[in-house]
Amino acid sequence: MSELEATPERYRDLLDRTRWLYHSSARLIEREHPELIPAGQDFIALLHDLHCGLLLKVYSTICQADQIWTQAELDLAQELAEHLTGQRLTGGDLNRAINDAAERSAKLEWSALVGPFARLTPLHDRVAELETLVVRQSNLIARIDGVLAASEQAAIKRITKELQRCLGENAATQDAAPIPTPQRSGPKREAPAPLEEPEEPPRSLEEVLADFDQLVGLGEVKHELRSLSNYITLQKRRADSGLPATDISLHLVFTGNPGTGKTTVARLFGEAMRALGVLPHGRMIETDRSGLVAEYSGQTAPKTNEKVNEALGGVLFIDEAYGLVGSEGDDPFGREAVQTLLKRAEDDRKELSVVLAGYPNEMDELLATNPGLASRFSKTIHFPDYAPLELCEIFGGLLDKHHYRLSQAGRLRVIQAITSLHADRDHHFGNGRAVRNLFEKAILRMANRLASEPEITEEQLVTLEAEDIPGGAAGDDEPRLRIACPACHHASAAPPHLLASRVKCPKCDERFVAEWGDLI
């Protein structure tokens, strides 16, 4: 069945998924990163308005392209109106609503409607999902009447280019940047019920560690944190038996290049400590120098204490922690933040874990600036760069999460592109972030490719082809791959056509799907 069959139901599903994406993102920021919300701003209401504006903008941009509203497009307008207002409009009321929506949406800027996903770091991993929803809405609306006009095709291309401009890697990503509030794009309704979200119950240690084991790579990191978990469990058992237990320090240093999983591991570490009963709630609060250091004398200590208070009972994750102390010259504000942090780390060590994270060399220099840092943060865990095969597995995880798949030629192109990125990496290589950027670019290229197709099947909507993957073009000679058996780890040379096929290990006879391989 094509994406355009049963369209009212499909369109309604896309509307609901877009609302969920915006509302869940608002809850995430409000719950875990309140420091990113400008003072006095109702962030949940703002993102609700942005979601409404985005839906209107997509619908009006496509339908206005040919200046003709067909009956099929009016049927979708009914679905949109009911989604936004809770009312099923017909006749003159529907026509007036359409005209009003067209007028209002013309005043809305794409950069404002999708701005939070470009500006706020915690939402960056949701960009691909947002792009997918907008692209699918655009194609569905344009093809609902069975005719793809040239003007509608051009409108789809304009939308994808605007998304690329606003959400691409050159988009502003400063968390402190204010988020503009658009004019309301439709009738105001009461706060919608989906905004209510019960607090999640605590997970067991086994459940948290199972998630931890599912992370790609990070073998030594997993070993270190499992050892720490085992040590804490042992000390608790000794204490429960009336035996003396060694005092436990939960303060850690994570070193590694960007995108190596430091933030994700810190979040799971907090959950594990909650499951062990060491930390009351285990939630992670993420910050950096800007969240601890003030601009004027006498304000840094209160600001740092406020951030520590926010994290009490969980994990305070300080990214790019080396920025607390300036690399050159005198930095009294930074030193004040460090001293305040050290005191709180000692005083609140039984209900607080502080994780300092950043590049390896810079973190070594930070620890050397203050003996107290080196003594209280004595445990350092290094996060190495991912290998090309591991980066391919991360790409595969993004495919599964966003309901895409690769053609066989596309799978080979991903291996080639990632191998090239890894070979050219430098000190600032983004690892998992670089893979996410590659995935997002592939989605936009796919949208541009399909925009000119008169008919699109469901298979086409979910399949990335080789031409959608930027970089990594094949040479004249067919490449060879080294594919490893997941059971015995024996690696064998194989031709590319075996990718995504079921193969048998020549050593242990285990049968497995050859998802990925290393270029030879």
Image (cartoon, grey):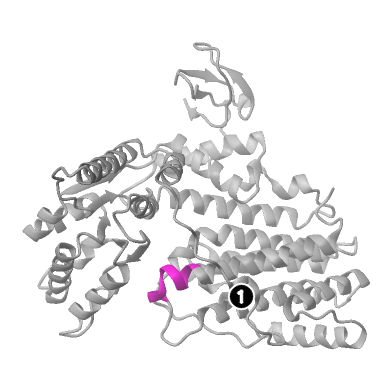
Q: Which residue is mark 1?
A: 110
Main SS of residues in magenta: helix
* 468 shown above or below 51: above
Indicate the position of residue 505 as horizontal and vertical percent values: 54, 15
* 307 shown above or below 420: below
Which residue type does callout 1 highlight?
A: Trp
Q: Quadrant of residue 325?
A: bottom left
Left or right of residue 56: residue 143:
right
* 361 shown above or below 126: above
Indicate the position of residue 195 as horizontal and vertical percent values: 59, 73
Indicate the position of residue 427 as horizontal and vertical percent values: 30, 49
Q: The magenta stretch spans which residues?
A: 28-36
- Residue 35 highlighted magenta (yes or no): yes
Q: Image point 27% across, 55% down: which residue?
A: 358
Q: Image point 65% across, 42% down: which residue?
A: 405
Left or right of residue 292: residue 66:
right
Q: Quadrant of residue 46?
A: bottom right
Query: In this view of the protein, can residue 318 be seen by the observer?
Result: no
Q: Image point 74% across, 64% down: which residue?
A: 137
Q: Label 1 neighbourhood size at 10 Å, few (<14), some (14-19), many (20+)? A: many
Indicate the position of residue 387 as horizontal and vertical percent values: 40, 37
Query: In this view of the protein, can residue 397 be seen by the observer?
Result: yes
177 or 377, nearer to the observer:
377
